[in-house]
Amino acid sequence: MKTKRLPSSVFFVLLALFYFAGDGNAQVRFSTAGFHVLSDSPRQVFDMNPGWRFCKGRAEGAERVDFNDSEWQVVSLPNGLETLPLEASGSINYRGEAWYRKHFTLPSGLQGERCVLYFEGIMGKSKIWVNGTLVGEHFGGYLPVSLDITEQCRFGEKNLVSVWADNSDDPNYPPGKPQTMLDFCYFGGIYRDCWLYTTSETYITDANMHNANKTGNGGVAVYYEHVSDKSADVCIQVNLQNDAVSPVRGEVEFVLRNDSGEEVAKSRENCRLKGNTTLKKRMTLSSPVLWSPDTPYLYTLEVRVKDGKGNVLDGYGIRTGIRTIGFDPKRGLILNGKVFSRKLIGANRHQDYALIGNALSNSLHWRDAKKLKDAGMDIIRNAHYPQDPAFMEACDALGLFVIVNTPGWQFWSDEPVFRERIYSDIRNMVRRDRNHPCVIMWEPILNETNYPDYFAKEVHGIVKEEALPGNNYTAADLRATGSRYFDISFTAPLSETDPGYDENKIYFTREWGDNVDDWNAHNSPSRVARQWGEHAQLIQARDYGRSPVGWASIDVLYETKPNHLGGCLWHSFDHQRGYHPDPFYGGIMDAFRRPKYSYYMFQAKSHQTRPMVYVANLMTPFSPEDVTVYSNCDEVRLTTQTGEKQRVYRVPQELGNKPFPIVRFEKAFDFMVDKKFARGGKHSESYLLAEGLIDGKVVASHKVCPARQSAEIRLSADTENMQPVANGGDLVTVVAQVTDRNGVVKRLNNTSIVFEIEGEGRLIGADKAVPVLWGEACVLVQTTSKAGKVRIKARMEYAGEVKPSAGELEFATLPSPVPQLFDADEEKQTTVALPTQGSGALSEEQKQELMKASKIVEAQQEQFGEKDGKR
């Protein structure tokens, strides 16, 4: 059988991957403060991440210039206040005040330039001072804080930025819910990047800082009309500000470049700039390469403001993809004028990571997107807040649709200030993310919340005002108040006989797969820690593929009508929770992004991943006799050690575009046969070999051998071919595996590993021996601000003559592409965040109150979750 494959234009996917995450020479181009620097523009950007003095707790007077912070710890951003244990659920994380102070010298050559301090995210509420002067206050942890600090700056001299941040409970801004009742964690700190950029007095404005009362204004916005393979209209809106006394006569130049840097379209607009001005321009591009999940081709739009002599006054670039989106109840998703041929299958994503909470570096965000794309996913739901700009850019470049969410979860307040801050968040998240081709819909409501009808109508209207034409679709729960206002309804798969089903509506399942006993105990066949072993992982993978009880699954989503677009698994990664003592174990990868069997099952269910085959059997004494194989090939051939002839499974001819089935070969493994080979010294003859065939040719294979005696520790860096950058805060996961002499991982062992590091890196999570779980021990390495070698050593906690031998890994870090501002003497003192101390146990009276409150959480999860009897 010949199954449906990617078109030949997959070449462009490979081109994009090489450009964005190549072999170490082709690194990812992340934006800085929302834009890309142009070499001929006077606009400059400085990396402010290294060298912050840090104090967890109250520090009276810490905003003052003369405050003594010499005893404070020095950290680099992103910083999440503390190093967390592997299991950090149950509200153990610190919640309260923290202070950051940064000493740096501004180059004297910047005198006369306008200076902007740009934080991508500070968790909770915050205040910012520059040289002792309060310059800003912010509420909410998921959107930018952008401040003009020109008047406070001292050029050629020492400067001080002081930041007070507080991630404690506060019902006056979203999400607003007490963290002991929250399904995710407000891990605190300045947990995203910080930049300082300069412009002349004539400049392109910042969409999140300027024109707060002007709808849909600020910065550069781009969208596309009349899109086809032959041509596309590029529609651009740019907002400009001239702070000079005299008006400026000149022009604004628009240049569109392809992924090779070649100019493919260009236009100019004459202008007279006095105060604030908005210009609109349309230019036509011939033979565009259109963006889609299969061909995520990106162009660069360059905008330059020039005076009458042709001098560039300001300018920057943005990465963008040309595409149009529409929805047809009879045909489904219409992408670039054509029916999208498969269901949108993906997952939800919280931003937290093992040990560091929310404080991921840009590379970790990129690797998350890469792993999800490689799993065969087409869509990610940003649960339950706007996520890091680096993640959005990765989804653009890799071909992942994104549902963008307002911060919120099961909480509503009638206080006007709460409502107004939600409205502000929605406007700012749309302005920040409106140019991303990956955005398929906006979710402006508060997740699983009983809000008023007027609120639903208002937030839908805000998106329509702020978003760009063709990219302004809104979504909300079908059973939520005011669902009639929204373009797309979230629901479990419905049949035509279900009450409320409407063949003219567009549906999508925002969360599927989590089949719990109740919303308090949270026992579920989908919640499986990786170290629980093969049997548990096989059940999770089976249920995510096709649940035996009819629960929503990949197969069930594919059986829906065209007006049901698909669904997002809850959840892509294991993650921490505030209101429950256990982490959420339902990810297809763990908190370090190490894959479970369900990861390979996702790959096998996808027609868009490369041909693959995976044997889900380790051949241990406890492995199942029946051998499960995941593959997306027409035919699977299994060679076993049981002495029988080769076994073959052929995909049914009628499969078409539906997901590939999970293949199971009965009684294909026998430990007693393996024992016979081992006793006879014929270890190499005991194996399972799966081969995947397409059109009769072997295109993929996977061989499994039993692990023998533990012999060594093998180290690897999970880089996804992205070399770490020496910017003071880049992160990479290092994995130590206990293996036999042939490199087969010994999954079944209980031990601990001690890590040591030399060179330009710092270890996170290795202050004591790290337990081996499912054959692996993981730590994080944070880069310094100096490019160079990093050497990591790993040994058993307790030495012994016959213990596995130590392992060693060396890699190099690349110089930072962005100039950095920090005090060199202070930066040398940088350490990693201190381990959490926990928040302490509650009294019995407090526990009783908490149990009462948890009933409300249970009721709302039951209200909005899948119902018994539904698929």
Image (spheres, grey):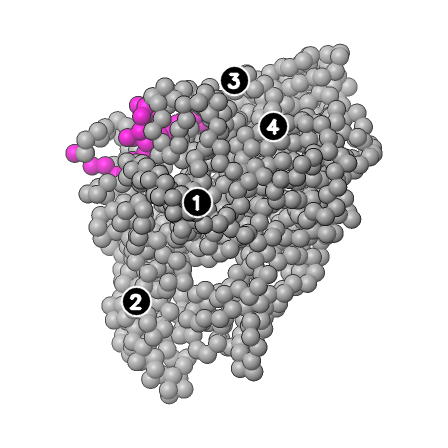
Residue 450 position in % (x across, y down): 34, 29
Residue 745 position in % (x across, y down): 46, 70
Placement of 185 over or under 586, stated as above or below = above
Q: Quadrant of the C terminus?
A: top left
In space, the residues marked 4 and 1 are separated at their CA atoms by: 26 Å
Amino acid carrying mark 2 in the image: Val
First along the sequence among labels 4 and 1: 4
Q: Are marks 2 and 4 in contact (CB under 8 Å)?
A: no
Q: Is residue 519 left or right of residue 118?
A: left
The magenta region covers 470-497
First along the sequence among labels 1 and 2: 1
Residue 578 tag number: 1
Residue at 55%, 40% (x, y): give it.
96
Instruction: Tell me the residue that label 2 is attached to.
Output: 627
- The answer to which of 516 and 206 lies nearer the viewer is 516
Residue 460 position in % (x across, y down): 40, 23
In space, the residues marked 3 and 4 are separated at their CA atoms by: 22 Å
Q: Are marks 2 and 3 in contact (CB under 8 Å)?
A: no
Residue 810 position in % (x across, y down): 64, 63
Instruction: Tell me the residue that label 3 is attached to.
Output: 215
Count neighbours of disc 3 (C-alpha within 10 A) and say few if under 14, some if 14 to 19, many if 20 or more: few
Secondary structure beneath label 2: strand
From this viewpoint, is residue 5 visible? no
Q: Are marks 4 and 1 in contact (CB under 8 Å)?
A: no
Placement of 420 over or under 74, stated as above or below = above
Count of all numbered marks drawn on residues in the image: 4
In space, the residues marked 1 and 3 are separated at their CA atoms by: 36 Å
First along the sequence among labels 3 and 4: 4
